[in-house]
Image (cartoon, rainbow, N blue to C red):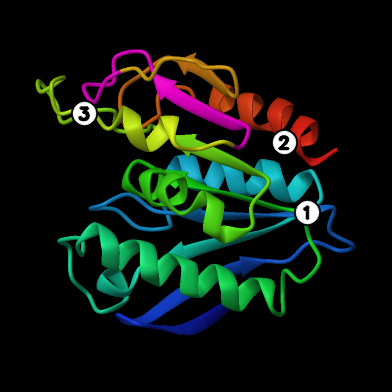
């Protein structure tokens, strides 16, 4: 693994790069609001994608690099994310077909910036459709705005809601809640089956 510090408009971000030999594509993933890049579902998906020949980059947002727990506002998260993706696509991920995504808040960032990132598909782990107990505060428009093939892996008892499938959006339900740790094998299997379909 290689760790790269990347300057963004909102301070240094960090990319944890897992290079593949002769990669067939690239996967760039962001973390959740209160967690980091070591989340168990991110680690599982990194292993699956790496085994499938993809170079994987886990992106640590500037607020986390600075040691803060509370996330930055959405526009700052999006700008920092795009700065990292642009930096990686200029060098380490040059000429590779790119899938973007993340868990929870990181999935929201990837969805909001999908068109600008140059990605061919979006992977959402535990997309937070609404705050717990507040289905009226839906974030479905962020998903509906994504025109790329999208996979959502969601816990069956996730208090943040269950996103609906759509024409370009596949939803795989696995056992467990928002952490997606109850059945990491099922999480990995869903991603393992989907990645080759969007990369070919």
Q: Earlier in the sequence, mark 2 or mark 3?
A: 3
> Would you say 115 lies left or right of 200 here?
left
For the residues labelled 2 and 3, the Cα–Cα distance comes to 26 Å
- The answer to which of 75 and 197 lies nearer the viewer is 75
Would you name the residue on which mark 2 appears?
Answer: 195
Q: Identify the disc placed on residue 118.
A: none
Label 2 sits on a secondary structure element that is helix
Residue 31 placement (x, y as % from top left)? 39, 53
Label 3 sits on a secondary structure element that is loop
Q: In this view, does 55 lie above or below 10?
A: above
Q: Identify the disc placed on residue 130.
A: 3
Magenta run includes residue 159: yes
- Residue appearing at x 56%, y 36% in the figure: 147
Q: Is residue 85 above or below residue 169?
A: below
Question: Closer to the observer: label 2 or label 3?
Answer: 3
Q: Earlier in the sequence, mark 1 or mark 3?
A: 1
> Magenta part of the protein: which range?
148-161
> Would you say 26 lies left or right of 177 here?
right
- The C terminus, quarter of image: top right
Residue 76 placement (x, y as % from top left)? 28, 68
Quadrant of the rendered structure where residue 167 is? Answer: top right
Tell whether label 1 touches label 2 (CB within 8 Å): yes
Would you name the residue on which mark 1 appears?
Answer: 25
For the residues labelled 2 and 1, the Cα–Cα distance comes to 10 Å
């Amino acid at each position: 693994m290689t760790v790269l510090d990347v300057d963004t408009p909102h301070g240094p971000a960090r990319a944890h790069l897992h290079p593949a030999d002769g990669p067939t594509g690239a996967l760039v993933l962001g973390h959740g609001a209160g967690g980091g890049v070591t989340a168990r579902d991110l680690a599982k998906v990194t292993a699956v994608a790496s085994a499938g020949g993809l170079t994987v980059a886990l992106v640590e947002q500037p607020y986390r690099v600075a040691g803060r727990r509370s996330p930055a506002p959405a526009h700052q998260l999006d700008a920092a994310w795009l700065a990292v993706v642009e930096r990686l696509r200029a060098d380490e991920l040059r000429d590779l077909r790119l899938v973007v995504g993340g868990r929870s808040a990181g999935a929201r960032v990837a969805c909001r910036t999908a068109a600008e990132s140059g990605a061919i598909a979006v992977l959402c782990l535990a997309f937070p459709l609404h705050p717990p107990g507040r289905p009226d505060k839906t974030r479905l428009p962020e998903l509906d705005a994504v025109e790329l093939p999208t996979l959502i892996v969601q816990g069956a008892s996730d208090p943040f809601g269950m996103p609906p499938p759509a024409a370009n959006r596949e939803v795989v339900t696995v056992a467990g809640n928002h952490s997606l740790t109850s059945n990491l094998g099922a999480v990995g299997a869903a991603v393992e089956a989907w990645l080759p379909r969007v990369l070919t």
